[in-house]
Image (cartoon, coloured by chain):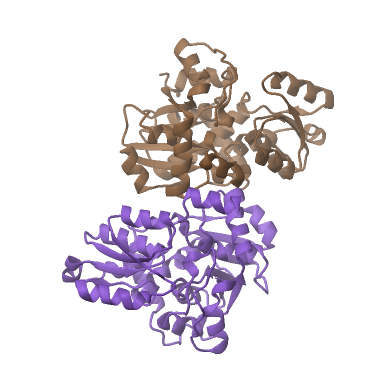
Chain colours: A brown, B purple
Amino acid sequence: MTDVRNATLPVTAEDVREAAARIEGVAHRTPVLRSRTLDELVGAQVFVKCENFQRGGSFKFRGAYNAASRLTAEQRAKGIAAYSSGNHAQAIALAARELGTTAVILMPEDTPRAKIEATAGYGAEIVTYDRYTGDRTAIGQALAAERGLALIPPYEHPHVIAGQGTAALELLEEAGELDALVVPVGGGGLLAGSAIAAKAAVPGIRVLGVEPEAGDDTKRSLELGRRVSIPVPRTIADGQAAETPGELTFSVNRELVDGIALVDDAQILDATRFAFDRMKIVVEPSGATGLAALLAHRIDPLPARIGVVVSGGNIGAERFAALIDG
Amino acid sequence: MTDVRNATLPVTAEDVREAAARIEGVAHRTPVLRSRTLDELVGAQVFVKCENFQRGGSFKFRGAYNAASRLTAEQRAKGIAAYSSGNHAQAIALAARELGTTAVILMPEDTPRAKIEATAGYGAEIVTYDRYTGDRTAIGQALAAERGLALIPPYEHPHVIAGQGTAALELLEEAGELDALVVPVGGGGLLAGSAIAAKAAVPGIRVLGVEPEAGDDTKRSLELGRRVSIPVPRTIADGQAAETPGELTFSVNRELVDGIALVDDAQILDATRFAFDRMKIVVEPSGATGLAALLAHRIDPLPARIGVVVSGGNIGAERFAALIDG
């Protein structure tokens, strides 16, 4: 792996620290939970960074607010556009409201209802598209151009990546030195930001991503050394249904990431249920994949002190009940 | 109300501080969560002390461990007995395991399965009885006498009350001065401990209990100035199905408590769902009654800065799913 201190990367640890200062007092500094049951089952000391408690229900608010807060007054007057499978949508809607501007969000038609409602609840305008046939990047860019909006993509943006890295920064501040950091991967923004922040703070730390088996585009891409595309993944981890890694995020992850673990839907559901029953926290399937990799013993070798980001909790009570009833 | 600094009470603020020192490093120092949505809906600043994250899934571990840790070596060699509708059971089972002794727990037959399983999972022996016909105090005392066990009751014990008060102590340390503290009431141990701790720390604070409408024994008793009994309450708040206040807890609450709010089962369910959907935390119905009183606007007058104890999270995913499907 590249030493982050020497690498030429599009986002630096200094950018993450600047983002941390910018979101302070606006984003929550989320708690780090411990569970003895988890430690026993995993066989290591596990520090759980609870981004399910973040504003907007996921880590996405960190990057969204960091990026939105840097828009010019002129851009803010026109408003923000975004496309998202859900959590970035809520994050942008909330960031726009915080900054006194408006947001138009392009969301897949089959986004869980709770996520669409929450986004609309923050005052954003919702436009839907079919994610099995439409290209959201193209539609989003056209929408932004047509209406003169500032487009903030869910991960392909240095300010978004820097913002996402602040969760790892806080986790390391609270837990102290860790041997490994495990984070869910969709487009790779959280992984990239986390890797930049973590490797600067603890040079020897292993940074590992976790993908659903059906959505292993980042794993495949890292193995081949280039970005590959896979068919639209069908997985309960709707927030991780990426077809290909981001160009910017991949350029970071290729340099800094130590590996990707895969978990199947049954393991993700088990982790979601474990979080509910034993940790008393609400985690959406996409947010539980890091926990799932630990509980299913997919991290090998297993270090002694592990940080894991529970990245989101946006699952409505009805959908949770339906998942449990199977 | 009596000034706690002058009152002669069976438990003092010094006892609570001693308990805090005794449980340090064994019990979790649980997080205090904020939610802007909650603040907006309630119309006040609300600080949520999350005892659903406590070991054993509720605040009960504080009192159980404080009491169990004071047993003599001889008593510990023989083991502990307890009776409980669920959360004290898990707390005692866990405290016994921590202290290297054994526990026998008397539980109602209709205790939610997740609570019985969790208690057995901590290594305790379970004995069940019919709570609509049996007298658990008498059965528990007979069981303890027969086997030579040290009986630790769920609230009628100074060390238990002192232990329960430590949650309020931590909440005030973290949130700073509060105008009011709202806590669920079953037998009254959490309320008594909280009132002792809070009124010593912030003399002007209002301490309010919350009961389910069907189980308003403490409210009636405070109004009459003496302990009254009601029929066994039928409510989804199974941890608050007390028929009469404890003698010891009532002697404290009569002096220090400023009022009791009532919430019905629908309001409790709404609060349980709010906690899931908006705060991403798992709260059992009994643990949600404080939140329910705030969300249903049952606290009048409403102060500016309110602490509320979410007292437990012991509800299995299946039972939660069934409640939501209603």
Residue A13, horizontal then vertical, whole percent: 51, 30
Name the quadrant containing residue B211: bottom right
Horizontally, residue B24 falls left or right of residue A4, namely left
- In this view, the residue in front, B318 or A250, is B318
Question: Is residue A207 rendered to the left or right of residue A187?
Answer: left
Q: Residue at x 63, y 46 (%)?
A: A26
Above or below residue B128? Residue B141 is below
| Quarter-of-image position of residue A111 | top right
Tell me what residue is drawn at x 66 percent, y 41 percent: A114
Quadrant showing the N terminus of chain A? top left
Percent from the top left, x then y, of residue A157?
63, 25
Q: Nearer the viewer, residue A299 or A204?
A: A299
Q: Position of residue B174 (x, y in %)?
A: 50, 60
Eyeballing the image, is A69 above or below B281? Answer: above
Q: Using residue A62 as the reference point, say whether residue A119 is left or right of it.
A: right
In front of the other: B17 or A278: A278
Identity of the residue drawn at 63% across and 63% down: B267
Q: Is residue A236 above or below residue B26?
A: above
Q: Quadrant of residue B30?
A: bottom left
Viewer-nearest residue: B65 or A247 = B65
Viewer can see residue A316: no
